[in-house]
Every structure is written in structure tokens, then in C-alpha cells.
Image: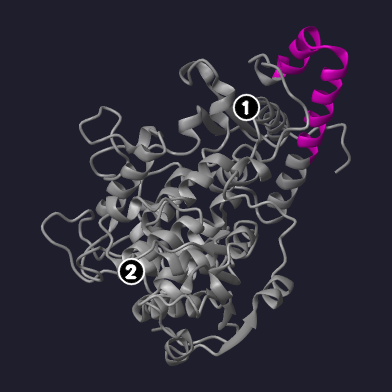
Amino acid sequence: MPEPTDQARAVVVLNPGDHARATRRLHALPGPGRIVVHPTPGGSAADLARNVLAALGKNPDHVDQDKLTALAAMRHAGAHASAAGVRDLVVDRGHRMPATLLRALAELTQRAGATLWLVHAPDTGAKSVVTPHEVLTGAGLPVTVATFTEFTEQLPVPTVPDQRTNPDVGAPWPVTDWPELPLADFPQFLTVCRRRLPGDLFQALRFLLDQEITTTRSWAGTQRRRGGFTHDRLLAYLRDQRLGPAPSGPVALIRLRAIQIALLTQGHYLRWNPAELGPDPAARLTGVITAKVGAAIASVTDTAASSATALALHLGTSTHGFGLIRLTHLAADGSRLYLPPPADPEAGILAPWEKEGPFSLYDPPDRLYPRDFPHLFTPDPIRLPEPVHRVLAAHRSYRQADGAGEDDPLFLHPTRPGDHNPERGLREAVLRTCHRLHLAPAWLHRTHCRHGDGLLPSHTRAFTWMEDRGLSHHVLAAQRPNPTEAP
């Protein structure tokens, strides 16, 4: 059982006669930092885990689909509650809960560092009634008693809507409802748009284009002062800052044309081939993890499956190299991932697992090099999409609750942790999760597909984020100095 935190405590809310006012009040309480759990009458520990996961906005059916035990399901629930910043855990009809479930709630409260509000009706006369004070105190929680009136005063109805029930509440909307824009290359893009768009819409496009050109030139100037930008830095700029977070395909297309114009003056040609991207190639430029996809990933109970899926979708690659990620590489809030390249690229890196069986992913397994994992070992930290910050933070919290230190691996093999590479199992988990989300990235195709699966670099060729969007980077020849410019 985890050690109690300074914030963890329990308040027994007295509701004489099991009055219906409590049910009406509790239905209005969910909000930011607050969840309300309605336990299944006569349920088991697994049922309580499903109730908590449902209150957190997760899909409780995944407990059965992933064959999770009651203990594992409660641990996942505690990790999700900690990552979601839950500070108030309200539980209805606590007088119907046996001592075993009260102890499970106490452990969950300690992991989240929250306040447990247990609505209790001591005068119902039910045979299953237990006194929660001794049980919760024995579990390590300080317990106080409050009347229902004091409870309503200390826990008022929130004014902010609960976004777990409607993910579209906080979804960003573009400033302008752009029509379908022409696919003319960047030298003629502005001219063609001027002929096809109304005057006010063209002025909005021109303003956004000029703004993006200025932003990219400023970024390029910063990289030049740092010694020049590389292909990896350009990929991260497109994926994490400009094209990936774009709210719509037309906005991404405008940003792309502006970036192409700005980079050409710096001696770099960013080519885009939309011919093989389907009927709406501009929509393929944006990142996969939108607000709705992020909410769908967050509904997955298994933190390892959801976090691996979030990383794979954002990086545009399979789980190749995910076994090398350690807890210290992931920020505590799940916002950044940074695997610093070693000082000597030829020295190799040590894998977290100790040995491999005959079906090793790497040969030899103890001689790995950063150049084999360019999507992970990057010169700068990888910015992760905001909709999956809590997903990644939840898995980090789950591993810490499991006793993992900062230097321990983030992902483990399910049956042989520390001995086997977990990437094959992670890939299957990502496949299953993407199937649930109705997503089919090209880099997740099976090995019998002619495109490969991007997992074994010695056998198949992996997709990159830019290649999946028809982008390629070319460095032009050094420009000759202008004789009219002053030295």
C-alpha cells in the first residue's frame, strides 16, 4: 500500500435515512479535479474498479477485454486519477460497502493524494453496514465527520462543465472556416488563391501566410545561431509546432506554403508531393492526435497501451525503440519526451533488458546505436500533443506506483520484465488500440504487407512522419555571394 500523502484524507458525510437529496446533489458535482463514484450494489473489487474508471471517463469494458485483475484495474484507476489531478473523490452510498472495498478506496485516495468524501447513512439498518471510521483509519487515512449541509458548503457545484462527457467543449476551432484551397505549388500559391478566393478571405489568407513566414524565418535564424538546423530539427518543427497542431487541413496547407517560402531563402527546399495522399491531401498534413482522438485514447484503461499508442501516433512510427525509454526521459506532466544522444555515437547504448531469446529484435541485442532510432534520440525535446499529456503522465504514475525509479524503463515485458524486449507486445497493443479507434496508419501494417510494418529495420523500411505526408527535405547548393552587398 502506498504511503499516505499530506493531502490524502477522508471525510464521512452523514446522510440520515439515505435521503434522495444526496443523489441529486452528487449528479451535479463532477467537474475539474473532482469525480463522483456510484458503486455497483453488492459489487466486487473489480466492479468498484469499473465504477472508478467510468467516473474518470475511461471505458470500463476494457477491464474485461484486456483481462485485467481487480488489483491491476484499481492500480490503473489510481494512475489515471493521479494524472488527471483528482483532488476530490466522492463516493455515494458508502454504508453499502464492505471493509475490503473501503480499504481499496483508501489506497486509491492515497495514490491520488485526494480527499475521499464518503456519503454514509448510518441508520439504514442494512445487514452490510460497516463503520467506516475504523476501516479508513486503519488504512492510514485521517478521518473526520461532516453533515450533509457542511458537505454542500465545502464542495459547491462547479461552474466549469465536465469535458469528459463532451470532448468537444474544449476543442479548438479555426478562426476562419476555410474553403478548399488550391494545391498550386508555393511559387504560384498566392497568385492562384487571389484569383479564386473572395477579397476578404484572401486578405485573411495573406495575413496568415505572412505571419507564418515571419515565424519560420525567426525559427531558422535561431537554428542558424545554434550552428544550423538539421533534418531532425526541421521534422520536429513541422510535427510539434506548425503542421501537426494545425486545426484543419487548409490551415496546415497555408502554413506549409509559408514554410516553403521561408526555407527557400535559407537554402533549403521542402518538397511536397500530394499526388499519393488521397482526395484531400491537405488534411493529411495535420497530426493524427486531435482533441477527439486524444479523448478516445484517454478512454483506454491500460496505461501502457494508451501511452504507447499516443507516442506511436504522434511520432508516426511503430514501437521500434520504445523499450529504450526510461522514466527520466518523459516529463512528469507528459508534455515532453527527450532521449539525449550520447556524446560518442559509436559507443553504443545499453538496453534496459538483460538478455534476449532466439527471436531477438536486434542483433546483437546489447549493441544498440542512436542512429538506429532517429525518431527517439533527438537533439531537442519532443513536444507531445496536449490531448495526451494526461495519458502519458498516467502511465508514468503507474510505473512509479509499481516501484520504478527514474532510471527504470517506462515499458516492461508483461511476463518477463527486465529480461525481454517489450516492443513486440507493445506493437500488438497499439494495433488493438488503433483498431478500437478506427485508425489504420500505414506503418502498422503486418510484415506480409508490401509496405512493411516499420518494426525491423534490417528487414523492412520504416515510414517517417514526413514521408507519410509526402514531404522531403533537400539542401540546395551554397548560394553565391551578392557582389552588390557590403561585406
Answer few, some or many: residues within 10 Å of disc 1's Cα (few below 14, many 20 plus, some between 14 and 19). Answer: many
In the structure shown, which secondary structural element does the residue marked by tag 1 occupy?
A: helix
Residue 382 at what x, y percent from top left?
55, 55
Residue nearest the observer in this picture, 483 or 447: 447
Q: Residue at x 43, y 55 (%)?
A: 307
Residue nearest the observer in this picture, 172 or 428: 172
Q: Residue at x 86, y 21 (%)?
A: 203
Q: Is residue 243 left or right of residue 370?
A: right
> Label 1: which residue?
249
Residue nearest the observer in this picture, 373 or 303: 303
For the C terminus, the quadrant is top right
Residue 329 at what x, y percent from top left?
48, 66
Residue extent of the magenta highlight: 187-214
What amino acid type should be assigned to the residue bearing mark 1?
Gly
Q: Is residue 115 left or right of residue 311?
A: right
Q: Is residue 96 left or right of residue 425?
A: right
Residue 278 at what x, y percent from top left?
48, 18
Answer few, some or many: residues within 10 Å of disc 2's Cα (few below 14, many 20 plus, some between 14 and 19). Answer: some
What amino acid type should be assigned to the residue bearing mark 2?
Ala
Residue lying furthest top in this view? 195
Tag of residue 8: none
Residue 244 at what x, y percent from top left?
59, 39
Taking the magenta stretch, the answer to whether it contains residue 207 is yes
Can residue 75 be seen at all in this image of the molecule?
yes
For the N terminus, the quadrant is bottom left
Residue nearest the observer in this picture, 191 or 63: 63
Q: Is residue 386 left or right of residue 190?
A: left
**Relative to 265, residue 162 above or below:** below
> Label 2: which residue?
45
